[in-house]
Amino acid sequence: MAELIEIKASPRQTMTKAALRALRKSGSIPGIIYGGDKPNASVTVEYKRIWQLMQTGHFLSTVYMVDLDGRKERVIPREVQVDPVRDFPLHVDFLRVSKTSRIDVGVPVRFLNEGASPGLKRGGVLNVVRHEVELNCPADAIPEFIEVDLTGTDIGDSIHISAVTLPKGVTPTITDRDFTIATIAGTSAGGSDEEGAGEAASQA
């Protein structure tokens, strides 16, 4: 496994709302580290660092190494509270994980070989039902994305999770049905686009 990206943190005492506002104004944001067999730890982290990591698009599905004044812990971000207007991070929750932990994460879907889809070549439209799929993964082997091959797909076809090859040890969190990830919809009124949309709604 590649070396984990590090996030530096500092201990934080319980703070009033005014103190939290001052903390954010100074370029830091509050957070908490929880889970495992240790007590919760209130921390502060650099706003700029969290903002940069959020721009990667997979902040909530990446394991990091938090350096809390020299004590290092493996964590995964589980929730980020953001400003409702400006979308800036205000607070972040980290869950402790070990190399043997299994966690549920949302993993983005990447579609391949659109040019090899007869349906898309004939003017069909890729209707994405799930842009990401919730998966149960080993903490040290979270896939960056899963790949859906569109080769041979035609108008009216649906791509289900059973058609996707998942990495070893990775399983969908939804186990009671073969849910739809995408369909190839037609463009004519009343045609297969409506049929595909109906199927997606019933199986997603």
Image (tube, helix red, strand yellow):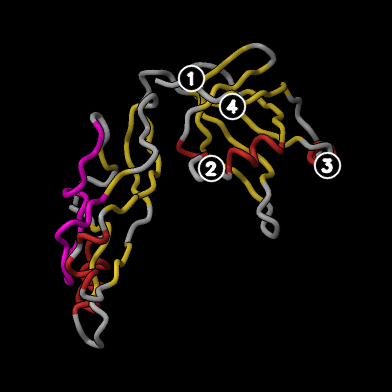
- Three-letter residue code for mark 4: Ile
Q: Is residue 159 magenta?
A: yes
Hey, which quadrant is residue 89 in on the image? top right
Separation of marks 4 and 3 at Cα, in angstroms: 22 Å
Q: Are marks 2 and 3 in contact (CB under 8 Å)?
A: no
The span from disc 2 to disc 3 (Cα, nearest Å) is 24 Å
The residue singled out by tag 1 in the image is 3
Q: Are marks 4 and 1 in contact (CB under 8 Å)?
A: no
Q: Secondary structure at mark 3?
A: helix
Residue under the point 72% across and 21% down? 11
Q: Are marks 4 and 2 in contact (CB under 8 Å)?
A: no
Question: Could you tell me residue 156's position as x and y percent?
Answer: 17, 71
Q: Residue at x 66, y 33 (%)?
A: 31
| Residue 1 lies within the magenta run | no
Alpha carbon distance from label 1 to label 3: 32 Å
**Residue 123 image point, x, y percent:** 25, 76
Q: Determine which of the numbered discs, if any, sits on residue 33 in the image.
A: 4
Task: Using residue 1 as the reference point, say whether residue 169 is left or right of it.
Answer: left
Locate the N terminus by quadrant: top left
Q: Which of label 4 and label 1 is nearer to you?
A: 1
The image quarter containing residue 38 is top right
Please provide the residue range marked out in magenta: 148-167
Q: Which mark is residue 56?
A: 2
Residue placed under numbered mark 3 in the picture: 25
Question: Which numbered disc flags the more N-terminal residue, 4 or 2?
Answer: 4
Nearest to N terminus: mark 1 or mark 3: 1
User: Is residue 60 depicted above or below 99 in this figure?
Assistant: below
Which callout, 2 or 3, points at the residue further toward the start of the chain? 3
Whole-angstrom CA distance, mark 4 to mark 1, is: 20 Å
Kindly report the secondary structure that dominates the magenta region of the rendered protein: loop
The amino acid beneath tag 2 is: Thr
> Is the residue under label 3 in contact with that under label 1 (CB below 8 Å)?
no
